Image (tube, rainbow, N blue to C red):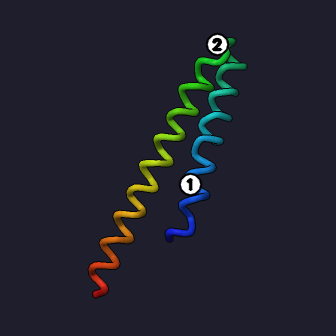
Amino acid sequence: MLVSIPLILGLSPVVGGFFGWILDRALGTRPLFLILLLAAGFAAGIRETWLLIRKASEEERRSK
């Protein structure tokens, strides 16, 4: 489970940035949505990482 953390931290901003880039091209609002969704991707990656670490810690405590 913890092995997926680098993947989550790496892909979340990439996916957010990609969708932001698509929206900016479609709406002509460079680089508004790119920056917003890139930041949202970073935040989502950090949040998911935090939740995974908490879940792993709880499972570790239960197994002892």
In front: 28, or 58?
Answer: 58
Q: Residue at x 68, y 27 (%)?
A: 21
Asked if marks 1 and 2 touch (Cβ < 8 Å), the reply is no
Q: Position of residue 61 (x, y in %)?
A: 28, 79
Query: Looking at the image, is mark 1 or mark 2 earlier in the sequence?
Result: 1
Per the image, label 1 sits on a secondary structure element best described as helix
Against 57, is 17 above or below? above
- 5 relative to 22 in the view: left or right: left
What is the crowding at mark 1: few (fewer than 14 residues within 10 Å), some, or many (at least 20)? some
Q: Position of residue 20 (x, y in %)?
A: 63, 28
Q: Residue at x 69, y 12 (%)?
A: 28
What is the crowding at mark 2: few (fewer than 14 residues within 10 Å), some, or many (at least 20)? few
Mark 1, mark 2: which one is toward the viewer?
A: 1
The quadrant where residue 22 appears: top right
- 52 relative to 9 in the view: left or right: left
Per the image, label 2 sits on a secondary structure element best described as loop
Which kind of residue does numbered mark 1 sit on?
Ile
- 43 relative to 19 in the view: left or right: left
Q: Which residue is situated farthest in the bottom direction here? A: 64
Which kind of residue does numbered mark 2 sit on?
Thr
Against 62, is 36 above or below? above
Q: CA distance from mark 1 to mark 2?
A: 28 Å
What is the count of numbered marks? Answer: 2
Q: Position of residue 62 (x, y in %)?
A: 27, 81
Q: Which residue is mark 1?
A: 8
Q: Which residue is mark 2?
A: 29
Q: Residue at x 59, y 37 (%)?
A: 16
Q: Position of residue 30 (x, y in %)?
A: 67, 15
Q: Which residue is situated farthest in the right direction here? A: 25
Q: Residue at x 64, y 13 (%)?
A: 29
**In which quadrant will I find the C terminus?**
bottom left
